[in-house]
Amino acid sequence: MKAMNKLKAFFTLDIKTMLLLVEALFFLGWARILVSLPFSKVAPTLGVPMQETSIMELERNRIVLKHIASAIDIMSKYTLWESKCLVKAIAGMKMLKRRNIESTLYLGTTKDELAKMIAHAWLRSGHFYVTGKEGMDRFTVVAKFAKQINANR
């Protein structure tokens, strides 16, 4: 019954929001497949290693960034697979690339309360954190990938 109510709610949304949610679901699935591959195969698709995109945010992108962040956050709760931080960050990067918006994906590590190594990923575009903002301050950046957009496109 709960699932039926959520499905009904989905179909009451405007078409633009529905399409964005479906796109987020698709890219979360795509990212989950990528995460299952050896990282050495995936890394070259993430952007320029150890580089960052500009912190300057174009005002026209602000609303798009918020909508993509929200769609990824919502849909990650409904995937049949695990959609944790790296999956969300890759999905967000792919969605931003489709819109010719630059982004930087960060990978960080730290130790938990039991001194066990843990990792986290987050995605930034301009000064807006699209995914993974929660807890990122606890992590030391060990890698970053800049997905730059050609001005000629």
Image: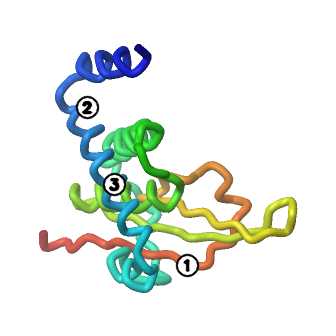
Amino acid tagged 2: Thr
Reading the chain from its start, which is encountered first: label 3 or label 1? 3
Amino acid tagged 3: Gly
Tell whether label 1 touches label 3 (CB within 8 Å).
Answer: no
Which of discs 3 and 1 lies nearer the camera? The answer is 3
91 is higher (above) or lower (below) than 18? below
Residue 12 sits in quarter: top left
23 is higher (above) or lower (below) than 8? below
Q: Residues within 10 Å of mark 2 (few under 14, many from 20)?
A: some
Mark 2 sits on what residue? 17
Amino acid tagged 1: Ala
Measure the alpha-carbon separation of dots 3 and 1: 23 Å
Which of discs 3 and 2 lies nearer the camera? The answer is 3
Reading the chain from its start, which is encountered first: label 3 or label 2? 2
Q: Nearer the viewer, residue 141 or 148?
A: 141
Q: Nearer the viewer, residue 61 or 42?
A: 42
Mark 3 sits on what residue? 29
> Which residue is at 23% across, 20% downward?
11
129 is higher (above) or lower (below) than 56? above
Q: Which quadrant of the figure contains the C terminus?
A: bottom left
Mark 1 sits on what residue? 143
Where residue 20 sits in the image (x, y, percent)?
A: 26, 39
